[in-house]
Image: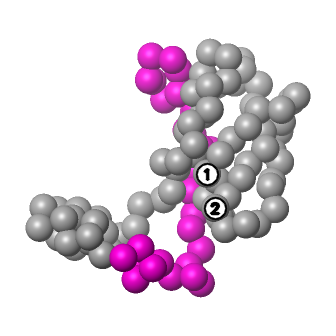
């Protein structure tokens, strides 16, 4: 999870997809989580890796209203603008634009 955006009465949460190696070998073990957390970030980064992600739309109370999936280059920011969402990433790619979903279709 990265940048959170409050859009009137809903919260937009960009998220990275889970990484199977972390789920299987690191997260179940406290000692492994502590070890990985102390490693230099440059050691853990793969410059060629594509980071996929999604956007969660939450109510103010925290209930998931909707999830948009399938973003190649995970969005790290979602900025509502007019009737669109501007999506940013960490990798310096151009900002993307998607139509903002209608509020009545949020579930």
Task: State which quarter of the image contains the C terminus.
Answer: top right
Name the residue located 57 percent from the left edge and 63 percent from the top edge: 52
Of pointers 2 and 1, the one earlier in the residue sequence? 1
Q: Nearer the viewer, residue 43 or 67?
A: 43
Residue beneath the point at 41% across and 73% down: 41
Residues in magenta, as a range: 40-69
**Residue found at x 40% / y 83%:** 43
Q: Is residue 67 magenta?
A: yes
- Above or below, 107 relative to 91: above
Residue 13 placement (x, y as % from top left): 55, 39
Q: Residue furthest right?
A: 82
Q: Which mark is residue 105?
A: none
- Would you identify the image quadrant in which residue 26 lies? bottom left
Q: Residues within 10 Å of mark 2 (few under 14, many from 20)?
A: few
Disc 2 and disc 1 in contact, CB within 8 angstroms? yes
Q: Is residue 107 covered in magenta?
A: no
Mark 1: give few (<14), some (14-19) or many (20+) Cα within 10 Å. Answer: many
User: 106 or 13, which lies in front?
Assistant: 13
Up-down relation of residue 105 to residue 79 (above or below):
above
Tell me the residue at 45%/24% (across/down): 63
Cα gap from disc 2 to disc 1, whole angstroms: 7 Å
The one of 61 and 65 positioned closer to us in this rendering? 61
Residue at mark 2: 90
Instruction: State the SS at label 2.
Output: loop
Q: Dot 1: what SS?
A: loop
Q: Say which residue label 1 marks.
A: 76
Q: Is residue 59 visible?
A: yes
Above or below, comparing residue 58 to residue 55 in the picture? above
């Amino acid at each position: 999870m990265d940048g959170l955006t409050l859009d009137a009465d809903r919260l937009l949460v960009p998220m990275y997809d889970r990484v199977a190696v972390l789920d299987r070998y690191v997260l179940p073990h406290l000692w492994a989580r502590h070890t990985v957390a102390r490693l230099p970030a440059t050691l853990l980064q793969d410059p060629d890796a594509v980071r996929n992600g999604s956007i969660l739309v939450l109510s103010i109370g925290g209930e998931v209203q909707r999830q948009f999936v399938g973003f190649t280059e995970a969005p790290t920011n979602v900025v509502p603008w007019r009737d669109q969402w501007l999506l940013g990433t960490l990798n310096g790619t151009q900002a993307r634009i998607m139509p903002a979903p209608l509020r009545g279709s949020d579930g």
